[in-house]
Amino acid sequence: MKTTNGNSFNINSVIMGRITRNKFHLINKKKYILINNGKNYVKGYACLINNNYKSEKVRYPFIYNVQNIDILRDNDIALVNRNGNIIVLFEDESDTNSIFITSKCNCNCIMCPQERFDEENNENIAINLRLIDLIPKNTKCLAITGGEPTLKKDGLIEIIRHCKNKLPNTSLLLLTNGILFESIEYVRDIVKIGHPNIDFEIPLYSDINDDHNNIVNCNGFYKTIKGIYNLYLFKQNVSLRNVILKLNYERLPQYAEFIYRNLPFIQHIAFMQMETRALALKNIDDIWIDPYLYQSELEESINMLNQRQIKISIYNAQLCILNKTLWKYARKSISLWKNIYLKECEQCKRRNDCAGFFETSNEIHSKYIKPL
Amino acid sequence: MSYQILPFRYNRYNDDTMFLSNEVGEYCFISKYDFEKYINCLLDKNSNTFKNLKSKYLLVDNEDIDSVVGLLSIKYRTKKSYLNDFTSLHMVVPTQRCNSNCIYCQVSKKNINETKYDMNKNTARNVVDCIFKSPSKMIKIEFQGGEPLLNFSIIKYIIEYAEWKNIIKQKDIEFIICTNLTLINEKMLKYLKKHNVFISTSLDGSKEIHNKNRPLLDSNNSYDLLMQSIELCKKYLGEYSVSALMTTSSYNVNNLNVVVDEYKKLGFNAIFIRSLNPYGLAKQNKDQIGYNIEQFIDNYKKVLDYIVNINRNGYYLIEGYASILLTRILTPFSTGFVDLQSPSGIGISGVIYNYNGNVYVSDEGRMLSAMGDEKFYMGNVNQNNYNELFNSEYLKSLIKMSCLESLPECSYCAYQTYCGADPVRNYSEQKDIIGRRSKSDICYKNKSIIKYLLELLKINNNSINNVFWSWITRKPINN
Amino acid sequence: MNNKISDNRCIFRFNKDIYCKEAILNTLYRLLEKCYFELNINNKNEYELVIDIKEIGNIEVFKKEFNNELIDQQLRIDIENKYTHIRNLIIEKAFLPIKDKNI
């Protein structure tokens, strides 16, 4: 998420609103956070932000001395708090926005790129409900993520229901390990909400239970598969994702066979290059393999899935290290705010089609990057 | 450290290799050496062999038995899911009269003026009523004969009555006519177009071969007439409205490539290489038009290679029998082909209603009755109700004797999940519904073809695999 | 212990502890086209199998074929004993949804 900060004034609790630089809103001012670099004080907005100093006369919620104020784009939705933090929860320019349910997780994936927060923010659900109120109605898609969203069953259900009511035209993508969906009652409760367009995306890292469980660090394999079957029983759309590591690249072809033999109803599989931060960075020696080196296994696996008419995407992969036959599956999947290219990429003719790199990957990438 | 073997069957593929398959058709080739370790629970858990066997549900860690039994039961149910809906294929014989004079005629046809062998309206109505009692949501009504078009009025009657009944029943109905197309005309085609009826015809090869196999009563040139009719059908019903199948006789068994070329020339995308069934004239004239099973298999393999190469060179052509077997070998799904099921599809997947209302468990059962043996007679729609026909002890006992899982030799055969029981054939060849595998041509044929397909799959050639998958998914490979 | 009596006939004797009746009968069934047989239990409590092959002169080949097939048949029975309970569980679980329904 994009974040910045400044000094807060008159802020007692969390404030949320849409960023705007327009001083002349006539209605719904309370929904907006005004960026106002100047000495004019404008009444009625949820909060004011500027990059210079405050005036003593201001009685409204106010954040001043904000750095990098330009990262706050109009119509982004931000949260500000009394510490002066400004957190962008929804980026207007992005088509991959998420609702973050909880940072807790019932797994401990060896390559998890998510920072763990020790404190659980108990107001998460309330914040998310307010966020959903503010999200534009024409938003195409929202991801629901975490940690593991299914750990907060009541909150998750409330959020999905609120999306159904407030954003009926927005499709939801629930990112989950599916372990708790081993309980058919849980799946039934989700389906009962009646959201018209919700897809489930579940990671499965191997065709072998031990290999998958070693990656997720919990006994999840068979539970996840049972969860997927339960979802299918209720006719839900399920997709898989597989992050390719040193620990699982060799069995990519057998993985393809396993998926088709056991989960032939899967809508889509995403093969992903890892984001090397947080736990992934910590465990880098155990998990890193140069993506260039597993291209033949990846290609064989994708050939097999193609033959079996299963849809595929490749996320986070650079075109120069992918076999050319696989380019049509590569997606520009990296969130805008952390998407960068290298110096080598300046000369590359394919730069605009290429996913590029994670800024957050601490400069760990393939040794074989070269301009095309 | 211990693991449990999961149910499997095996055969010795060659001197060094064993072929293993499980209850849901997943398979594995392993060395004799690894096999020994596998069955004695001595495989190294970190070895690729162990992992491959685990991935294919041939073994399971002791602590995971419960989870895996649950998953396997779901897969097993999927493999048997053709049983769910009961009878979906209903063959109807509008008349036993025929104007063809095929040398291998299996149905003991009657002369074209013997109209007492036509189905009447009363029977037709009872047939349709019976069909709609089937719980299956998908119904395929297939007109067979004789030559069905000789009694086109009853066909129309049946189609219209079925459509009328379906307003309430709301089933998924498909009509198909199996015809020699000699009598087709514009008026009939307009009718068929209006009611969305498909056509299946017989094409046995080039002009010379086809005319030898399938002369008409009044002409030796059925080929030219067939070509004209096919053009007419395409004009009125569309490019893909006609499908064809062929029958192998001694006249084309050694020239199957020529037959395939003919199909390609006419733009067909599917062919079914069928061997001769020992009924009617085919049995009677065995010496002249028959061939032994080894000859068929030899030529089948050659033509299969030929067809695969045609696909590799860019023309999409499915071989029907191979594509059914490949679906059984490579996918978790079941197939609805009544001859390759366990329990057999007789009565419970497909059934035939003769012109006089007599109901038989299969088309072969009807052929036997035409030869004088009513062994497979289930009843008559004009006298018996649905329950008496389909819920009878008679049918149940037949089914019990057609489960491969409990037939001698089949019960331990490694190809069991890919194969099916053929009780009618066993009876007709061996006078025994259970039959002895070593005397069964069908067993020999299936084993040989399945083994050949497995050999081709073992090579793991990408372009051959692409062809096979294009047949299974019914989608041509996009290059 | 096998004894060849003539070009067409031989006698097999099987220790009941090693080979079960089912394995012997399955093997015979497989090779029935090629022979006639008589199966008994002798006074040493062994299975005694008298084989007359139909095709004259090939008794040695037949003996080898028989022994190889017998090993496979016995092996199949032994292996099946190791997993038959699991197979029953799988099938029972597969048909659970319709177990008590009146069909």
Image (cartoon, rainbow, N blue to C red):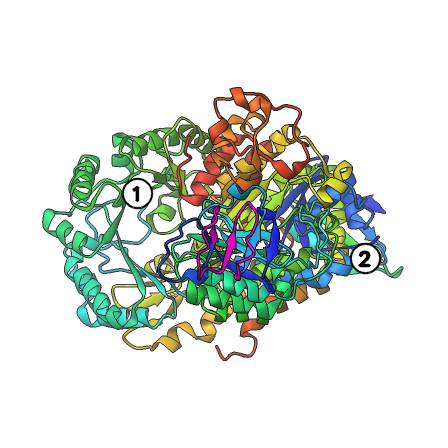
**Mark seen at residue B244:** 1
In the rendered structure, the answer to whether residue C7 lies left or right of residue C98 reads right
User: Which one is closest to the eye, mark 1 or mark 2?
Assistant: 1
Q: Tag 1: Cα neighbours inside 10 Å, few (<14), some, or many (≥20)?
A: some
Instruction: Answer whether residue B311 is magenta in the image.
Output: no
Q: Tag 2: Cα neighbours inside 10 Å, few (<14), some, or many (≥20)?
A: many
Q: What range is drawn magenta here?
A: A34-60
For label 2, the residue is C47
Q: How many marks?
A: 2
Residue farthest to the right, as pictured: C44
In the rendered structure, the answer to whether residue A220 lies left or right of residue A131 reads right
Q: Are marks 1 and 2 in contact (CB under 8 Å)?
A: no
In the rendered image, is residue B336 in sight?
yes
Vertical side of B130 occupied by B196: above or below: above
Quadrant where the C terminus of chain B sits is top left
In the rendered image, is residue B274 in sight?
no
Give the chain of mark 2: C
CA separation, marks 1 and 2? 56 Å
Give the chain of mark 1: B
Looking at the rendered structure, the secondary structure element under dot 1 is strand
